Image (cartoon, rainbow, N blue to C red):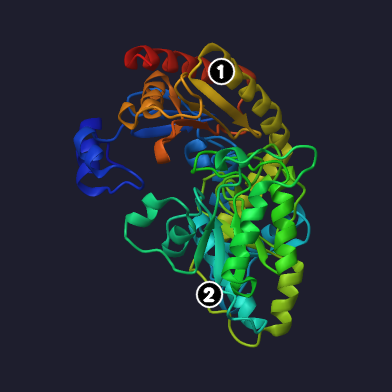
Amino acid sequence: MEKYSREHLIELDKKHFIHPTTSIKQQQTHGASFIFSEGNGIYLKDMDGRQVIDGMSSLWNVNIGHGRQELAEVAYKQMGKMAYSSAFSTFSHEPAIILSEKIASLAPGDLSTVFFTSGGSESNDSAIKLVRHYWRLKGRPERMKIISRKKAYHGVSTGATSLTGIPEFWEMAGSVEKNILYADVPNCEIQGHTPPVSGDKCACGGKIRQLIETEGPETIAAFLAEPIQGAGGLIFPSDGYMEQVRQICNEYGIIFIIDEVITGFGRTGKMFGMDNWSVVPDVMTMAKGITSGYIPLGGVVLSEKMHKNMIELSTGTLFHGFTYSGHPTACAVALKNIEIIEREGLVDNSKNMGQIMLDGFESLERKFDIVTNTRAKGLLGAFDLRPTSGQKDNFPTELQVAANVVALAAEKGLICRSVTYEGMNTIVLAPPLIINENQIGDVIQILEDSISEIRNKLAI
């Protein structure tokens, strides 16, 4: 490939490349903030030689870290043998079959049958279509409504945008499906309820029950939830919430769908996020960590019961599928990726290093009175920045406190993420699962230096 200067690439970037989830005006004014050329372990390097810690695993997905030659080699080998073949019309191939079996062996409970996609949005779109198809097969076509949640993120394709409970994504194109409902966030304190104690039921469950009764249980197809709400601000469910949702879905015959796109494949210190609560959904969606981002792949996993019902009731063609459903090379890469996660004990490393990361966040909370609500499960963690005058208040929006901290941290060598919906100032981290204690120390030091400088600069 021809060698271009950074300046030339920036101009070409402005002219020809529309970036996802980016300010078009900012891109045109300032150009690309980084033009990355190399990745190794937890680090990314740009074409000027600047090295930064990839504190977000890029988009929550590079679980085994950058530069893994084993994945390149298995992709090369599969491409040399058979890069692609269709899985339509009962055509099949070994990588998809073996990966399906592997996922079934890892997934919670009786989740055992996989429909493959190319990513998280396709997975969540497919899940709601498969669930609605399931109810039609069972003679219940009126079960069309899907309950999602406020501040949920489930993707940006047309169906997934409607499932996403963040209005900014709806406003982009001005369309939301009418059969999607939004329950409140899964945290009592955020909702203003008293958190449950001593085994009491979470008050959030009562509001879900009320929503179901208002809409009519016979019209509800499924309840869709992330184990931990990611892009909406890393919102953890209150104690007992997941168990209560499972019970409510059982009571009303509603299918419980769990979106493991971010939380799957070791991110939370368990293979899947729901393993932290020992609650088994009826359907699970996945993507991201299944290949650690080395090649696009996602999927929907159905329970054995649902699959058997579909086998018994289906008479015609399932008119749903993507060109790249079960892509052989992607499946081969996923199998090697999972092998590395298991061989290197990365699920346990995520749990252990996650505790060290949380300890680091708590040290920041002791040092800075504007740092609060530190939280983490495995290597999925966050903290909030709020005025010392009232830790439930937010800073004035125009100060852009979290965004300024993130920008300065990037200059100092750490990529992390800010969440600023509805006035929040949340800093989120999700580093690769291979990170070690010394590297976490570097992360915390950069955060400390960045918060200190921004606090002094803004006089907050």
Q: Residue 334's spot in the image, x, y percent?
A: 61, 51
Q: Which residue is more in the foreground, 428 or 105? A: 428
Q: How crowded is mark 1: few (under 14 residues within 10 Å), some or many (20 or more)?
A: some
Instruction: Give the label, 2 or 1, closer to the camera.
Output: 1
Q: Which residue is more in the foreground, 255 or 95? A: 255
| Residue with the mark numbered 2 | 320
Quadrant of the snapshot with the N terminus: top left
| Residue with the mark numbered 1 | 365
Q: Residues within 10 Å of mark 2 (few under 14, many from 20)?
A: few
Secondary structure under badge 2? loop
Q: Residue 106's spot in the image, x, y percent?
A: 74, 52
**Does 241 sit left or right of 177 as displayed?**
right
**Residue 128 figure quarter:** bottom right
User: Which residue corresponds to the image point at 24% horizontal and 35% vertical from the top-left?
Assistant: 31
Q: Residue 365's spot in the image, x, y percent?
A: 56, 18
User: Which residue corresponds to the image point at 61% horizontal and 87% vertical from the top-left?
Assistant: 316
**Compared with residue 219, is residue 111 higher up or lower down, i.e. above or below?**
above
What amino acid type is highlighted by mark number 1?
Answer: Glu
Secondary structure under badge 1? helix
Q: Which residue is more in the foreground, 305 or 249? A: 249
Mark 2 or mark 1: which comes first in sequence? 2
**Compared with residue 211, is residue 53 higher up or lower down, i.e. above or below?**
above
CA gap, disc 2 and disc 1: 49 Å
Q: Residue 42's spot in the image, x, y percent?
A: 53, 29
User: Which residue corresponds to the image point at 69% horizontal and 55% vertical from the top-left?
Assistant: 245
